[in-house]
Structures are given as structure tokens and as C-alpha cells.
Image: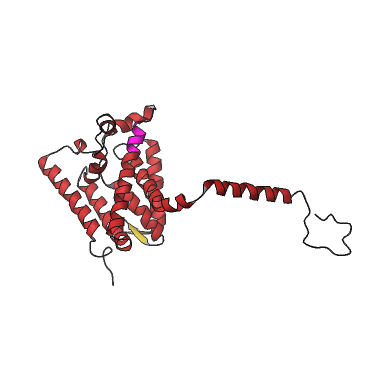
Amino acid sequence: MYSFGPGRLTPAVKAIMIANVAVFVVTYLAGIDVRTLGLRPEAVVERFAVWQLVAYMFVHAGPSHIFFNMLMLYFVGVELEQMWGTKYFTKYYFACGLGAGLTQVFLGILPFAFANQFYVPATVGASGAIFGLLLAYALYFPTRMFLVFFVFPIQARYFVMILGGMSLLFSLGGAGGIAHTAHLGGLISGYLYLKGPRLNRLNIVSELQYRYLKWRINRMRKKFDVYSGGRRDDYDRRVH
């Protein structure tokens, strides 16, 4: 038997999809320029429009933009919410979206010439949060198969690696029209959110001391011949 997708919509995924579709329909029918609702680092920094860090996730530039974002939200979000629960899933989704937005703001305020391309233009879409979901899916279900363009099968871990590599390549190449750096921000934010508790438990100082001591022990071993015992006929050996 075959089925399309992971099953019925879960509460958080359903609410997010309804909110995105509703905003898209309203902006489309009213003829509202979505850039006025997008994330602009200039507005966040100079006018403290922090609401844009959340609002931009519900605004999309066109039918194909929202369709593919919501399709991917359905494919990976439902199973993650079933596993995590609605509360954790919602927090993770918005953490990735906020991380993607803050990436744009951070790049926009850097004291370099390239920062101008981030400071004024508007970023819209849920892609940053979706990329965070893709990362989590690849970590929990690395061998699960994706059908790229509904034709080519590929494991989830390789699919996300390819997407991340393409986003990095395009962001360095300055591909216009798509906020590839926001995609990378969503990936990084998702990783830090999932691995954060483990990183917090790691005592960096103790780890460095341990590594240094281990290096010294290995270095000293190279200077001496170490034997775990002796026999009567090894009187001519150096025993340390």
C-alpha cells in the first residue's frame, strides 16, 4: 500500500499553514506589496521594528513560493510534531525562523560593503524555518527517502547536505532574488537549538586540560622505552 505524505495534519502544522495561506490570500487580493511586510534590517535597527522578525515568516512572494514551502512543511513537519509534541515543535519552528531573520539583520549591519545588499531589501517567506525543520528531519531520520521532483530518490541526510551546500554556494555567488543566507541561518539555528543542551553541559576548560594532558603523555612515551615487566635476560635493556 502507498500513501501520500505522513498522514493527517497535526495541530501546529495546520495552524501555521492556515496562517500562511490566509496572509497570502489577503495580500494577493488586496494588492499589498509584500515587501512592506517583510523583514528589513534597516527598519529593525533604525525604527526598532522587531515585529518584522516574526511577520516575515508568514509573507510569500508568489503562489509557487508558498506552495513549495507549505508542501515541505507538511512532509517533514507532521512527523516531527508527532514525535516532539506540539509545544516543542512550535518553539523549534519559530526559533529557526527567528534565527534566519537575525542572520539577515546581522549581515546587514556589518561594516563592509557587501552588507548593503542585506540592509535595505526585504526578506519574506518561511524558508528559513523550513530549512531548520529539514535539518531536524535529516538528524532524526537520516536514511528516510525523499523523491526530488517526485522522481529521483535520495536519502534525507544527503538531500539536506545538497540544499545546504547550494545555499552556501549561491550566497557566496550573490544569487539575486532569494535569501540563501536566511536558509543557512535556519540550518544553523536548528542545529544549535537541538544540540544546545549538550553543548551547555560540555565543560570547555576541562576538555582542553584533558586534551593537553593526553598530548603530553603521548609525547613523553616517544622519549622512553616503557616495559610492563622484566626478565633475567633483559639486563641490557633500558627500563623506565
In this picture, residue 35 sits left or right of residue 113: left
Above or below, comparing residue 148 to residue 209 in the picture: below
In this picture, residue 23 sits left or right of residue 2: left
Magenta span dominant secondary structure = helix
Residue at 31% across, 36% down: 176
Dividing the picture into quarters, in which one does residue 167 lie? top left
Residue at 72% across, 49% down: 220
Along the viewing direction, whichever of 201 and 74 lies nearer the viewer: 201
Residue farthest left in this picture: 30
Q: Which residues are magenta?
A: 103-109
Dividing the picture into quarters, in which one does residue 48 lie? top left
Q: Residue 95's x, y, as percent?
A: 32, 48
Q: Residue 60's x, y, as percent?
A: 22, 44
Q: Is residue 108 magenta?
A: yes
Along the viewing direction, whichever of 108 and 64 lies nearer the viewer: 108
In this picture, residue 37 sits left or right of residue 139: left
Kindly tell me whether residue 149 is visible in this rendering: no
Q: Residue 4's x, y, as percent?
A: 26, 64
Q: Quadrant of the C terminus?
A: bottom right
Q: Quadrant of the N terminus?
A: bottom left
